[in-house]
Image (tube, rainbow, N blue to C red):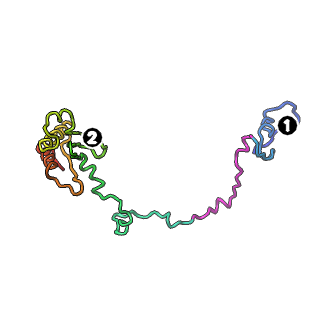
Amino acid sequence: MVSTISSSSSSAPSSCSLLSSEFFPTRSTQPFKAASLSWVSSFPLVNISISSIADPPTPTLNKNSVVRAAWTRRSRGEAAKKPNRKSWKQKTDMYMRPFLLNVFFSKKFIHAKVMHRGTSKVISVATTNAKDVRSNLPSLTDHNACRVIGRLIAERSKEADVYALSYEPRKDERIEGKLGIVLDTIKENGIIFV
């Protein structure tokens, strides 16, 4: 609090009288007003006593707030509760075999592409529907077309500095026939399957 220091004998305001409560309003001199725009009224009133500092309240422990040790292995019951949790192979396979070959056979064409799993970026594409391939082939779906697509995929993958691919067959898909020809042609042209 600001103390009032003034001399009663002087009529002109001195430096001591500038510190009076006339110039600096305090809570002791002015009553509290709800609509006051004074800077003093913006401070909240806080009652601090020595007893509240000496005896702090004791915190209560909640059973759920205790940090438990991490489990290294999941039990069967825990695995049954979380069936969608990925295995180690599912988590790391994208990094161990990053380039994935995708081959699609339609009634009219053969499409093949190599994708990077992490970024979903297409590395190389070959299709019998392309103008340069379509004009040179008598049939767009026979075994000769499969060999051409395999050779194009291998060449374009090498241009992109990709020398190892992986192929995941779909459910109930056998690697034989046209698909086997495409994969064998890619292997013959210097690409390793991992």
| Res. 101 in view | no
Q: Amino acid at mark 2?
A: Val
Q: Residue at x 17, y 40 (%)?
A: 140
Give the quadrant of the N terminus.
top right
Q: Which residues are magenta?
A: 37-59
Residue beneath the point at 14% across and 41% down: 145
- Residue 155 point in image, percent of width and height: 16, 38
Q: Which mark is residue 7?
A: 1
Residue bearing mark 2: 122
Q: Secondary structure at mark 1?
A: loop
Residue 10 part of the magenta segment: no
**Left or right, residue 90 beside residue 177:** right
Q: Main secondary structure of the magenta part?
A: loop
Q: Residue at x 14, y 37 (%)?
A: 137
Alpha-carbon span between mark 1 and mark 2: 90 Å
Task: Determine whether, in the image, residue 131 is placed left or right of residue 75.
Answer: left
Residue lying furthest top: 12
Tell me the quarter of the picture where residue 190 sits. Answer: top left
Q: Is residue 40 magenta?
A: yes
